[in-house]
Amino acid sequence: MAKIDAFFKLMNEQGASDLHLVSGQPPALRIRGDIERVKYKILDNDDLKAMLEGGVDRLSRGISIAVFPQTTRSSHFDPEAFNTIGAKLARRAGVPLVPLALRSDAWGTGQLIRDFGPFRPSLPVHFAFGNAMEVKGNGRAEHNAVVEFIGRNLKRWFSEVSPVGQREGR
């Protein structure tokens, strides 16, 4: 079984909604709104590459996965902070890329670690799916289309998107 499958099995056993995999940190699960670290080694780039291959395998078998390509959660939209992992996965697996825009004020940012903030289910969550697209060449055009889709939806959900480098409310 691939490493990624073991983490998905653990997610199911623990009732987790999210799996967080970041180089330089141990894996973490979101369980009932709280982030809990998995007792596992600190992940490195080779671990993430192996898990990427596990993602390609799952996609090739018809199993959908959601990838959030922003390097970290943020209160402002910065197109430069998005990586191309979603387009790479879709291209390698030969499956379409489906844009997903998400605004979740319910999940706050943590004081010490941004991704370990409080969860406030009383706050709204907005999401929108775009049209599926075939990834061609290096996937840069499709990646840019996804980022533009996210930006358009965020502008619709906010009266204006905060300029890069500024946080909302400042």
Image (cartoon, rainbow, N blue to C red):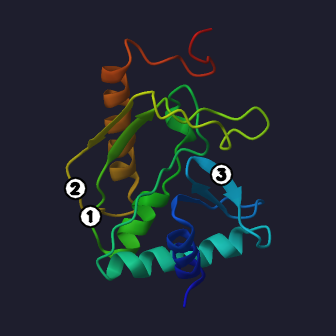
Residue at point 30% right, 74% down? 94
Secondary structure state at the residue bearing disc 2: loop
96 or 37: nearer the eye?
37
Quadrant where the C terminus is found in the figure: top right
Measuring 79% from the left and 72% from the top, which residue is drawn there?
A: 41
Picture layout, residue 11 above or below residue 9? above
Asked whether disc 2 touches disc 1, contact meaning CB atoms under 8 Å apart, the reply is yes
Residue, disc 2:
132
The reply, left or right, for residue 72 in relation to residue 41 is left
First in sequence: mark 1 or mark 3? 3
The residue under label 1 is 96
Can you give x and y, in whole percent of width and height, for residue 78 in the image?
Answer: 53, 31
Category of crowding for the residue at label 2, using alpha-carbon neighbours closer than 10 angstroms: few (below 14), some (14–19), many (at least 20): few
- The total number of labels drawn is 3
* Quadrant in which residue 124 is drawn: top left
Residue picked out by circle 3: 35
Q: Quadrant of residue 48?
A: bottom right
